[in-house]
Image (spheres, helix red, strand yellow):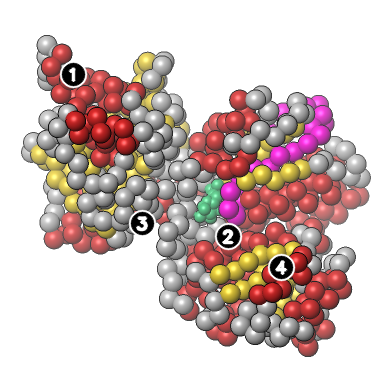
């Protein structure tokens, strides 16, 4: 949700900033802008629209200089206009900044600043911060015997931050101190890239690719002062701190599109590998169980767990639903799946032996972070199932499991979902083997899991067929997605994919439950996507399918290879390889991802950057 970048060094800042913003565009793409300090002034270029539109403005009106900041916006306060785009300027132009987050008390601060004579140009909460820092800077200058001392900038930022309620990742330039960039965070991620005589600031590590792999992740209430000669790290309560520099793995920033037209398609096709990576080194064939390095709980503590709460948002929440079925089936541990946005304010009774897992691709989702913090505050061991290494949730959790899926750039999550389901399967196996699951049963699960990357590879062969199905249904405006047991969460996820990227309305439902409402929607213009692989309740699902057919609803069936009974019952049948029921989500989700993708492409939608959405939702 908004991406910010900053650069201080000896190279042309605008090129580095624009390149960085292009990599952060998945975080928001309503408008973009940069500000570069040069010869006693700060030049701002900003524009509603995508980064490349702003970049062509910079091409027409270049901004020289080697110190600058940039922003790509997901609008929260104020419409998508040039004026509301970041960077924002405070006072008489002495402070220019970019912001990611939400300032909750902006209205009151705005009034106070207006009373002091500050003139506002935008409707954003960010402009309030710019004026506030400028105001505090003027106050510091009045107090200071040596008004050129760069520390007054830091004191001004510190004084302003104390007045803010809400979340922020900020990068600030000062017109009269052209060798300094200050960045600070509460609730919104920030990474400092450490180069040779140069530093970078970014919302995540992706803009650092090709520049440096040495990073410092800022924690909440930390502030960093960057000059060309060095960095100084300060904490609001703890004062000066030594930065802990970490080295990024090369895959953490790899984001090439390769031969694919869109990131989403690339990521769909990466799934045989990403699922394999989620299992790598985690299968213990001798003990017929899974192994995890980072749970940070003893087997005794884990054995005492008698309830699990999985909390997440969006696609990760759907993976959690699959996890609930797996954990209850294999480990017999009562499991609940909570929307993080609800859990953070609810007060469910959690006992001492409840274990909480936050499931998140980005590790930055504001609601998931808040829910996790609330559970930790109450003393529950709270672990993360997370993809982005070094993200806030990964760092704050008591322990966790990384997905190792590599960067997911497409806003609609695909490979993260199958990796989350894989990790949850391993977790259920592990906890199950500590309890009721026998050695042969564990061994069988492992063997089935090992075959899954190959099965996904096979499932991907339906791509061309799915494209033809998409042609047929591209103009339909309403879809139902129906499945039962392990395929119910898949139905929810399939419907979400279609909504997100093609803007068609789609509703996911348990296939039998549709009789209690959604069946009223069925007509010849409302296709139902039916998940009907062979399994324990196959014939029940087929009966549900017949109920739709009886009402002349078109049916697209996802079925097991060789199940030709469905040829007569469905308008289209997409075949996937047969796997054990508990592993079906890993293969049945593949055609649904492809169906959403192709319908969206045929409808001319921007698949990787769907309207109104952002990859990483760092506001509440
Ligand atoms: C956003 C994304 C979704 C994602 C959800 C949760 O809405 O567009 O694709 O599933 O956030 O994100 P997380 O990073 O916590 O998994």
Residue at image position (31%, 32%) is: 108
**Outermost residue toward the bottom?**
568
- Residue 254 is situated, as x and y percent measured from the top left of the image, at 45, 53
Q: Is ligand 1 within 8 Å of the beta carbon of the residue shown at mark 2?
A: no
**Numbered mark located on residue 517 in the image:** 4
Please tell me whether mark 3 sits on a helix, a strand or a loop: loop
Using the rendered view, name the quadrant where residue 486 is placed.
bottom right
Name above or below for residue 91 compared with residue 262: above
Q: Earlier along the polypeptide chain: callout 4 or callout 1?
A: 1
The residue wearing badge 1 is: 140
Residue at image position (85%, 37%) is: 434
Q: Earlier along the polypeptide chain: callout 2 or callout 3?
A: 3
**In this rendering, which labeled residue sits more in front, label 2 or label 3?**
3
Q: Is residue 348 visible?
A: yes
In three-dimensional space, the C-alpha distance between marks 4 and 2, rounded to whole angstroms, equals: 29 Å
Name above or below for residue 158 compared with residue 402: above
- What residue range appears in magenta? 293-316
Q: Earlier along the polypeptide chain: callout 4 or callout 2?
A: 2
The residue wearing badge 2 is: 414
Q: Is residue 458 visible?
A: no
**Outermost residue toward the left?**
39
- Residue 373 is situated, as x and y percent measured from the top left of the image, at 57, 31
Please tell me whether mark 2 sits on a helix, a strand or a loop: loop
Q: Residues within 10 Å of mark 2 (few under 14, many from 20)?
A: many
Q: Residues within 10 Å of mark 3 (few under 14, many from 20)?
A: many
**In this rendering, which labeled residue sits more in front, label 4 or label 2?**
4
Residue at image position (91%, 45%) is: 438
Contact, mark 1 vs mark 2 (Cβ under 8 Å): no
Please tell me whether mark 4 sits on a helix, a strand or a loop: loop
Q: Earlier along the polypeptide chain: callout 3 or callout 4?
A: 3
In three-dimensional space, the C-alpha distance between marks 1 and 2, rounded to whole angstroms, equals: 50 Å
In three-dimensional space, the C-alpha distance between marks 3 and 4, rounded to whole angstroms, equals: 37 Å
């Amino acid at each position: 949700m908004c991406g910010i970048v900053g650069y201080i060094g000896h190279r042309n800042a605008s090129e580095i900033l624009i390149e960085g913003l292009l990599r952060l565009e998945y975080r928001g793409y309503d408008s973009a802008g940069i500000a570069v300090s040069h010869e006693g002034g700060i030049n701002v270029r900003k524009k509603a629209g995508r980064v490349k539109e702003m970049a062509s403005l910079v091409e027409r009106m270049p901004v020289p200089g080697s110190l600058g900041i940039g922003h790509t916006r997901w609008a929260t306060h104020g419409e998508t206009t040039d004026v509301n785009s970041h960077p924002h300027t405070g006072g008489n132009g002495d402070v220019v900044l970019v912001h990611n987050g939400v300032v909750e008390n902006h209205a009151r601060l705005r009034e106070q600043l207006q009373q002091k004579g500050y003139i506002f140009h935008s409707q954003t909460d960010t402009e309030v911060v710019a004026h506030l820092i400028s105001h505090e800077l003027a106050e510091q200058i009045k107090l200071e015997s040596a008004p050129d001392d760069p520390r007054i900038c830091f004191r001004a930022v510190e004084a302003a931050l104390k007045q803010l309620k809400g979340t922020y990742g900020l990068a600030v330039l000062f017109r009269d101190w052209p060798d300094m960039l200050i960045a600070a965070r509460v609730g919104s991620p920030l990474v400092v890239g450490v180069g040779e005589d140069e530093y970078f600031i970014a919302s995540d590590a992706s803009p650092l690719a090709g520049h440096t792999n040495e990073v410092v992740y800022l924690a909440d209430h930390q502030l960093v002062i960057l000059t060309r000669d060095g960095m100084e790290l300060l904490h609001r309560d703890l004062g000066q701190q030594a930065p802990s520099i970490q080295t990024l793995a090369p895959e953490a920033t790899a984001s090439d599109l390769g031969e694919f037209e869109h990131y989403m398609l690339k990521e769909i096709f990466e799934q045989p590998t990403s699922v394999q990576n989620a299992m790598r080194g985690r299968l213990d064939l001798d003990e017929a169980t899974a192994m995890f390095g980072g749970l940070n709980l003893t087997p005794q503590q884990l054995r005492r767990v008698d309830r699990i709460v999985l909390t997440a948002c969006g696609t990760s929440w759907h993976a959690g639903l699959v996890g609930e079925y797996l954990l209850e089936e294999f480990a017999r541990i009562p499991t609940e799946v909570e929307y993080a946005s609800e859990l953070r304010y609810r007060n469910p009774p959690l006992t001492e032996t409840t274990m909480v897992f936050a499931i998140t691709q980005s590790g930055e989702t504001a609601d998931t972070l808040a829910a996790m913090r609330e559970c930790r505050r109450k003393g529950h061991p709270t672990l993360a199932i997370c993809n982005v290494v070094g993200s806030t949730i990964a760092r704050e959790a008591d322990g966790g499991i990384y997905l190792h899926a590599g960067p997911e750039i497409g806003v609609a999550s695909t490979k993260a979902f199958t990796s989350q389901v894989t990790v949850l399967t391993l977790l259920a196996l592990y906890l199950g083997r500590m309890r009721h699951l026998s050695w042969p049963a564990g061994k069988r699960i492992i063997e089935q899991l090992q075959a899954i990357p190959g099965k996904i590879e096979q499932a991907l062969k339906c791509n061309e067929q799915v494209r033809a199905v998409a042609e047929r249904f591209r103009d339909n405006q309403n879809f139902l997605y129906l499945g039962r047991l392990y395929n119910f969460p898949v139905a929810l996820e399939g419907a979400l994919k279609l909504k997100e990227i093609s803007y068609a309305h789609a509703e996911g439902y348990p296939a039998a439950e549709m009789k209690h409402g959604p069946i009223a929607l069925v007509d010849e213009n409302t296709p139902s996507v039916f998940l009907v692989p062979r399994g324990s309740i196959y014939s029940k699902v087929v009966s549900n399918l017949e109920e739709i057919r009886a009402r002349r609803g078109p049916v697209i069936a996802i079925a097991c290879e060789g199940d030709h009974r469905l040829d007569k019952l469905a308008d289209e049948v997409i075949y996937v390889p047969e796997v054990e029921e508990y592993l079906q989500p890993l293969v049945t989700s593949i055609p649904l991802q492809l169906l959403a993708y192709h319908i969206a492409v045929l409808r001319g939608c921007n698949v990787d950057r769907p309207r109104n959405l952002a990859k990483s939702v760092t506001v509440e």
